[in-house]
Image: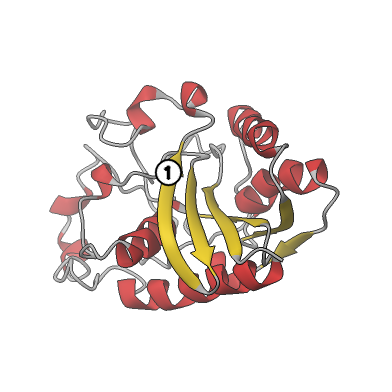
Amino acid sequence: MSDITVVHLMRHGEVANPEGILYGRLPGYHLSDLGRQMAERVADHLASRDITHVVASPLERAQETATPIAKAHGLDLAADERLIEADNVFQGKTFGVGDGALRRPENWKHLVNPFKPSWGEPYLEQVVRMMAALDAAKDAARGHEAVCVSHQLPIWIVRSFVEKRRLWHDPRKRQCTLASLTTFTYQGDKIVSVGYSEPARDLVPAHLLAGAKPVKGKQKAFGA
C-alpha cells in the first residue's frame, strides 16, 4: 500500500438564499440549480481519481454537494459533524455589505474581538475539529483519496493553520470559492503539501470569487 494519501476538502456549491440570510447551521438551506451544476462539475472533475471515501458536513447543502461525487465512485456518503459550518451569533440575520449591520448598537458587543472571534466559534476550536475530521478521512482512505465537503470558514481556517498563517483575517480575501478543492497530501500521517483548485470557477458569480470587490446587496452571508 502507498504511504501517500490525498484528502480533498471541498466547499459546497451555491445555495438558494434569495433573502441573503446568514444561514450558518440552520436547516433547510439547499443547493440552487447553479449549485447543483457546480457539484456535478466537480464530480466529473474527480471521476478519474482514486477516491475511496466521501464524507460531508450534515447540513443539506454539503450533503447535496457530495452526493454526485459519492455516486460517481459507487460509494456510500458519510456524515461528519466535525465538518459543519462555524457557529455564529448572527445566524438567521442579514449581515453583509451595505446593510448597516456594523452601525447597529445591539451588534457592537459581538464585534469586540476579531482575533478570537467574539461573534462565533473560536478559530482554534475550528482547527481542532477540522484537523480531526481530516485525519479520520485520511485513515479511511489510506493509500487512496478522500473527499470531505465542508464550509468556507472552517476550510480556510484549517488551511491557514496548516500553512502557518494567522487565523484572523479579512473574510473577503479567503481563497475558498464555491465548489473549490483545498487538497491535503499526506505522507504517512504527515501533511506534506497543500493545493488549491477551482474546477467550477466558470460557474461562480464574479462577485463571489476570492478577492472580488464587495457589491452592495450581493455579498451577504459570504462565510457560508
Q: Locate residue 54 relative to residue 192 in the image: left or right.
A: right
Q: Please tell me whether residue 125 is drawn above or below residue 193 in the rendered image.
A: below
Name the kind of residue labelled 1 in the image: Tyr
Q: Position of residue 142 (x, y in %)?
A: 67, 67
Q: Quadrant of residue 58?
A: bottom right
Q: Nearer the viewer, residue 186 or 207?
A: 186
Residue 100 appears anywhere in the view? yes
Is 107 left or right of 28, judged from the image as shown? left
Determine which quarter of the picture holds residue 209.
top left
Position of residue 154 relative to residue 118, above or below, is above
- Point out the image quarter for the N terminus: bottom right
Q: Which residue is mark 1?
A: 196
- Front position in the image: 13 or 189: 189
Instruction: Please tell me in which quadrant of the rendered image residue 65 appears.
Output: top right
* Residue at the limit of the structure toward the right, as seen here: 74
Name the residue nearer the viewer: 223 or 16.
223
Q: Residue 158 versus residue 191: which sits nearer the camera? A: 191
In-image side of 27 versus 129 (left or right): right
* Residue at 82% across, 54% down: 75
Q: Position of residue 189 (x, y in %)?
A: 52, 74
Label 1 neighbour load within 10 Å: few <14, some 14-19, many 20+? some
Res 90 seen here: no
